Image (tube, rainbow, N blue to C red):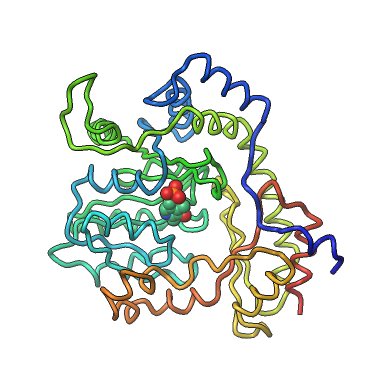
Amino acid sequence: MNSSFKKTLHDGRPNIGDRQKFHQYVDEIFDRRWLTNRGQLVQEFEKELADYLGVKHCVIMCNGTIALEIAIRALNLDGEVIVPSLTFIATAHALQWQQIKPVFCDIDRNTYNIDPYEIEKHITDKTSAILGVHLYSRPCDIEALQKIADKHGLKLLFDAAHAFGCSYKGQMIGNFGECEVFSFHATKFFNTFEGGAITTNNDKLAEKVRLMQNFGFSGMDNVVHVGTNGKMSEICAAMGLVNFDEMDEIVAVNKRNYECYKMAIPSIAGLHLIDFDEKEKCNWQYIVVEVGVNYPLSRDELVSELHANNVRARKYFWPGCHRMEPYKTLFPHAGEMLTITEEVVSRLLVLPTGTSVDETTITKIVGLMQR
Ligand SMILES: *Cc1c(COP(=O)(O)O)cnc(C)c1O
């Protein structure tokens, strides 16, 4: 390995659109002296996203976690909500923060998404909803989940933080369940520094979410509902507009990167690369590798080896929410029903991609994995 490769940190830096255009937006924001509170850019951005997703309502938020919390409140969820444990901790925290018990459900061995056939084992008279997560750009088995939700009178919503720009049976993610929640955090494929959104085709829900996002204000002096501050600033919306204009290019780079990884990884014995449905739209953001038993190194050893060469591979989502606090203490036996999750968390790693990663870098990363 040559030393210049090792001197650079290969971690898949955030995607950044046209700087010139961004600076121009910032000047306009200062000229208008309208910094937040549903400014012109937030409104433009909301409209652009709703059009793109083909959804009736898109309410832009300050981040994905607050958006999840607001969605959960607006749907009047309580008691218990069934979620996968293999997800970012915010999915569980958004429930726990509001005194709702996250009930962890196992995943499908092939898709890593919540297994619809495991859900019924967890339904009690306290269950109010199913919160699915479209993990690693791949939609859940939405139809099966909707069927179970309908059968038991449960609400269904989605954490779509990984699936902006992806489709399910030809329809964009953002249109399913009662609502879907996106994150536009810097580490996501499409970012606004910090940001998020709730999308829904339900007029009443959209209205409620809008009230809750702005302290319950309806007009200047009239508060009609309990609320919080979930607003996005104009600066973040400017970043969103700039990145939106370059989304096709970002996706093309991600796809090229994925194909570059795909040329080499499947031929390495013991490594399995995630695959995506070519018939659907995809953001190609998650280069997930499963380390099998016949690979000479364990996942942890391989990650250490990559880190030693300055490749920032991540063990997403080790060790699973149920093994992190407070859930580990609250539900010490949760793992007993999470056989597949427990196996998979010790086998997965996520490799760098995005516009800061090129083909030469990928060839070198893959070279480190060849044994
Ligand atoms: C990033 C992420 C979130 C949280 O979004 P933020 O915008 O960082 O608050 C929630 N769920 C999943 C699955 C995520 O990856």
Q: Look at the picture and state if 142 lies above or below 49.
A: below
**Residue most toward the left?**
125
Residue at position x 17%, y 60% in the image: 79
Q: Residue 21 occupies which quadrant of the picture?
A: top right
Q: Residue 252 occupies which quadrant of the picture?
A: top right
Q: Look at the picture and state if 62 lies above or below 87.
A: above
Where is residue 36 shown, x and y percent of the image? 41, 26
Quadrant position of the N terminus in the picture: bottom right
Residue at position x 62%, y 21% in the image: 24
Quadrant position of the C terminus in the picture: bottom right
Where is residue 237 shown, x and y percent of the image? 49, 30
The answer to whether residue 139 is seen in the rendering is no
Residue at position x 54%, y 48% in the image: 188
Where is residue 329 shown, x and y percent of the image? 29, 76
**Residue nearest the viewer, comparing 261 with 88:** 88
Where is residue 205 shown, x and y percent of the image? 25, 36
Residue at position x 48%, y 14% in the image: 32
Image position of 270 (left or right of 75): right
**Residue most toward the right?**
2
- What is the number of callouts on the image? 0
**Residue most toward the top?**
31
Image position of 321 (left or right of 17): left
